[in-house]
Image: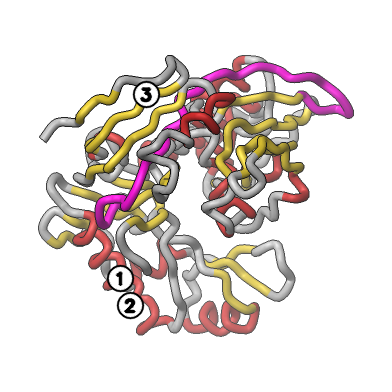
Amino acid sequence: MSATPVAPATDAWTLTADAPLQGRNTFGVAARAPWLLAVHDAEALPQALDLPPLRDAPLLLLGGGSNLLLAGDPPGAVLSLETRRIDIAGRDGGYTHVHADAGVPWHALVMWALQQGLAGLENLALIPGTVGAAPIQNIGAYGREVGEFIHAVRAWDRDAGQFVKIAREDCAFGYRDSLFKRRPDRHIITAVEFALPQVPQLRTDYAGIGEELAAMGIADANARDVAEAVIRIRRRKLPDPAALGNAGSFFKNPLVAVETATELQARHPQLPVFPAGDAALRKLSAAWLIEACGWKGHRDGDAGVSDAHALVLVNHGQATGTQLLVLARRIAESVQARFGVAIEPEPKLIGAIW
């Protein structure tokens, strides 16, 4: 069944009925949206959302579809922001401020910043998704989180009926968490302003970056070198969604009490344990826990676990979102049974609850 185009009221948006979503999620799971609203001008967002088919409909924000598992069809409208502007907004206090629209692909922003000689985002290279989705999950990798570099978030406040600019300190950033994740129906992020340090503060001591730089023959790394090291590591460990459907790391690294971490590491000396930004907590490696339970490379029909990285669930072709979710639950249950640790998914679940 093909999508049914609906003539747009303005060039600022396109509205499509009964829209397929298989090409809009990196798992490649088949699903359909009753309405798909693609917005090309963020200033027109309030008018677009007031269209009769959308006025009272549930709304799902969809960026690159890389942090999403469609275990069913979304119940209402799907919104995709297609805005793509990036520019330097100013410089002050030792920082360069960069404006990026919500629809900019995240990796494109990282590479643009490096081309401008701007450091800070290099450890977050090759993360799929869009700029607008990044603050919601407070995306992070290799010792960095995006919240460290956000100055403010511009959004449409659906409760207040106005555009707002939310300062970093009001975004409530935490590990894979934020104000926007806690209140998912309130804010529609339209752009993000980043503050990137003019004096680079490189982070090369995390998860093999130093070893990768050494293998590249680089002793005195710059931000571009760090990005290249991260890209090389990620390409070895994570399958390309274009070739094998996946949403990257499916499970969060669990946070546990220091006492629990100490006890587990005493019983399992190889278990990686990391600081958690809280003296009372430690972060455990979900990948290690899952691999220790024997799931790496496992396959149930077309739903499986990557043979390169135990954190990555994959769609070998025709897996449904429900099949992937069933597998994820089995993995979590086995980790709980063996280690007494609960692990939770990173992607947003549609059509199901965890």
The residue under label 1 is 329
CB under 8 Å between callouts 1 and 2? yes
Badge 1, how many Cα within 10 Å: few under 14, some, many 20+?
some
Q: Earlier in the sequence, mark 3 or mark 2?
A: 3
The residue under label 2 is 333
Give the residue drawn at x 28%, y 25%. Answer: 6
Q: CA distance from mark 3 to mark 2?
A: 43 Å
Q: Which residues are magenta?
A: 70-96
Q: Quadrant of the C terminus?
A: bottom left
Residue 240 appearing in the image: no
Q: Is residue 50 above or below residue 174?
A: above
Q: Secondary structure at mark 1?
A: helix
The residue under label 3 is 14
Q: CA distance from mark 1 to mark 2?
A: 6 Å
Give the residue drawn at x 62%, y 79%. Answer: 257
Q: Secondary structure at mark 2?
A: helix
